[in-house]
Amino acid sequence: MPKLYSQITGWGKYAPANIVTNYDLEETLDTSHEWIMQRTGIAERHIATENESTATMAVAATHDALAQAGITAQDLDLIIVATSSPDYHVPAVSSTVQAMLGADCPAFTLVTGCTGFVYGLVTAHQFIVNGAFKQVLVVGVELVSRFLDWLDRNTCVLFGDGAGAVIVAPSETPQGVLGFDLGSNGADGHHLMMEGGGSSFPMSYEVIDQGKNFLRMNGREVFKFATRVLPKSTLAALANSDLAVDDLDLLIPHQANARIIDMAVRSMKFDRDKVFVNLHKYGNTSAASIPIALVEAIEEGRLATGDIVALVSFGAGLTWASAIVQWGPTRAR
Ligand code: UT7
């Protein structure tokens, strides 16, 4: 069998139509547009309405990705949905997505917080290069707004909802995922967590009274972790791909905070013009942030054939995940 590479052949994104600006948040919270812009770079975020769910957003993004790849849902061999905000604990939202798409293939959900999409892409890469599957759907989707305490200004101003999807398929020319870096430091997991609703604190009136049913974050600690790990993981993934910083044409970092991105880029002495940032429009969409940014980068003509792009994420766990991708022709046939 010839050596196989895994290529991204289709992509799509979805963001709810409902937009909540910083000025809207000023109405209900002790915060200001100026504070949020200065400290994070976020101006607005998309927030799902009642008729939307994690599954419907994933499916909407997938339809575009399938069309772009020139395949149908029946052609899919595997579905990986990365999310920490599924429709239900059980069944896995990946199976709901599989049914809604009308696909006939295995499906699983991957839960690593904001790094989920890159973990999923690297997992898809394994199935492709070992010849097990030919068409793998990877979705990063988050409906985090339903898990936020909208009275907690430390968290609710930061996040938004959305979905991004890619199709990964085999190619015999060297392109697609060239290398990666994955990591986890669970000892610091308490800095970003939702305590309630799991087996430690099953949902109860007490859990709700204590506000343990919401996502909580120690922003300063996560900030320190993020500024450290973003350059470190980028360099590790580049080394794993036998490349150096100078080889990078585009860096797509997890869209959490513009200050984190700026500090990391400075420490790598990387050209800020080669960094893609769209968090002002979406906030932090967790597992959806990198695929949404990737799709927008493509739409804005920021990626040409042969370009080397780094997808670099960090988040709950605490985890990190980076992949180096060589952008190829759109279809692997
Ligand atoms: O995807 C997961 C990864 N998550 C992240 O990467 C988030 C990482 N952390 C951050 O982005 C930043 O730490 C935050 C944006 C969350 C906070 O920024 P900061 O510069 O670290 O602020 P701080 O936590 O040090 O808080 C400074 C002050 C505090 O007031 P006092 O204690 O100095 O009086 C906060 O209470 O700002 C206050 N504050 C706010 N003020 C207005 C916190 N949130 C707000 C707010 N509006 N929304």
Image (cartoon, rainbow, N blue to C red):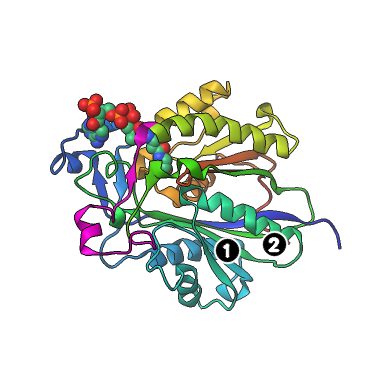
Q: Which residue lies furthest to the right in this view?
A: 1
* Residue with the mark numbered 2: 127
Horizontally, residue 231 falls left or right of residue 129, namely left
Residue 174 placement (x, y as % from top left): 77, 48
Residue 139 placement (x, y as % from top left): 51, 59
Hey, what amino acid is under mark 2? Phe
Point out the frontmost of discs 2 and 1.
2
10 Å crowding of disc 2: few (<14), some (14-19), many (20+): many
Image quarter for residue 74?
bottom right
Horizontally, residue 74 falls left or right of residue 21, namely right
Whether residue 40 is visible here, answered yes or no, is no
| Residue at left offset 33%, top offset 61% | 197
Quadrant where the C terminus is found in the figure: bottom right
Q: How far apart are marks 2 and 1 (CA)?
A: 11 Å
Residue 135 placement (x, y as % from top left): 65, 66
| Residue at left offset 53%, top offset 39% | 252
Horizontally, residue 20 falls left or right of residue 193, namely left
* Residue with the mark numbered 1: 137
Q: Disc 2 beta carbon < 8 A from ligand 1?
A: no
Residue 47 placement (x, y as % from top left): 29, 53
Residue stretch rendered in magenta on the structure: 197-220
The secondary structure type at the circle numbered 2 is helix
Quadrant where the N terminus is found in the figure: bottom right
Q: Ligand 1 is located in which of the four quadrants?
A: top left
The secondary structure type at the circle numbered 1 is strand
Foreground of the two, 187 or 33: 187
Q: In this view, does 248 lie above or below 77?
A: above
Hey, what amino acid is under mark 1? Leu
Image quarter for residue 36?
top left
